Amino acid sequence: MTDARAYQARLREGHWFNGLPVALQEVLLGAAQVERLTAGQVLFRRGDKPCGLYAVVEGGMRIGAVSATGKEALLTLVEPPYWFGEISLFDGHPRTHDAFAEWPSTLLLVPQARLLALLEQQPQYWRDFALLMSHKLRLAFIALEEMSLLPAAPRLARRLLLIAENYGEGELRRVIHLPQEQLALMLAISRQTTNQILKELQAQGILRLTYGEIEIVDLQRLREAAQ
């Protein structure tokens, strides 16, 4: 089994992990277990007991929920180096959403018991995990505001920028691996509306669309479209 330290450089590409005290980085790497998922494999479902904190180091994970009737709400599609699962670390309550692999993926799991023991001994580290959660809470409030106040086109442009920056956890990447159907789910707009907006942005030379991918051609103009 690959040791978690093999992914240290990848994790340090992320703003949260790279900003941690070196001692805490070492503890997390030393405690982490490597887990591999096949495409479509469920990691956990809403209501499952918390098992720890995860980091995506290869592949990508879909975070969302599926109703009893099969209707899906997709919140995020996250790629390396992204950490998630911290809500249950704070309250000890069951998982709030479903998480499953979009592609073959590799994750690091820092078990809940190890984290709680660490925080019992070193309570100053609670702040570092609180920063991880507060960053996501800030993004959630922004998304709610945009849902209420912005038309579909600028809302879509803003979401593309956010995904390209891996929700604030990495440097901007020009190619987003995201089918249009999933983007529509994230924004709660129709597939037809999503396709129309994307094609308009492509006609303006802002994006280039290929199967399952969206390439940002003109970053400045995409930012202008997001205003």
Image: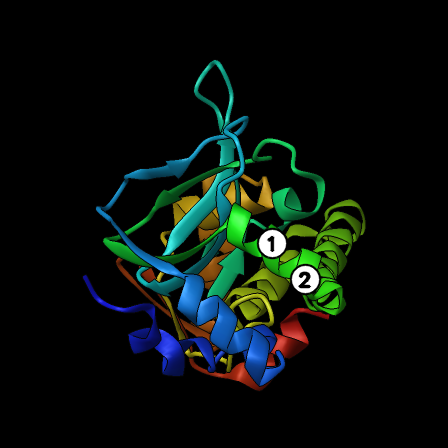
Relative horizontal placement of residue 207, taking residue 23 as reference (left or right): left
> Which numbered marker is on residue 117?
1
**Which of 174/54 is in front?**
54
Relative horizontal placement of residue 189, taking residue 211 as reference (left or right): right
Q: Is mark 2 on a helix, strand or loop?
A: helix
Q: Is mark 1 on a helix, strand or loop?
A: helix
Q: Residues within 10 Å of mark 1 (few under 14, many from 20)?
A: few
Q: In this view, does 64 lie above or below 153?
A: above
Q: Residue at x 43, y 73 (%)?
A: 207
From the image, tell me which residue sits under label 2.
121
**Which of 131/179 is in front?**
131
Q: Residues within 10 Å of mark 2 (few under 14, many from 20)?
A: few
Give the percent coordinates (x, y) of residue 96: 60, 35
Amino acid at the residue labelled 2: Gln
**Which of 34/205 is in front?**
34
Whether tag 1 and tag 2 are in contact, CB under 8 A, the answer is yes
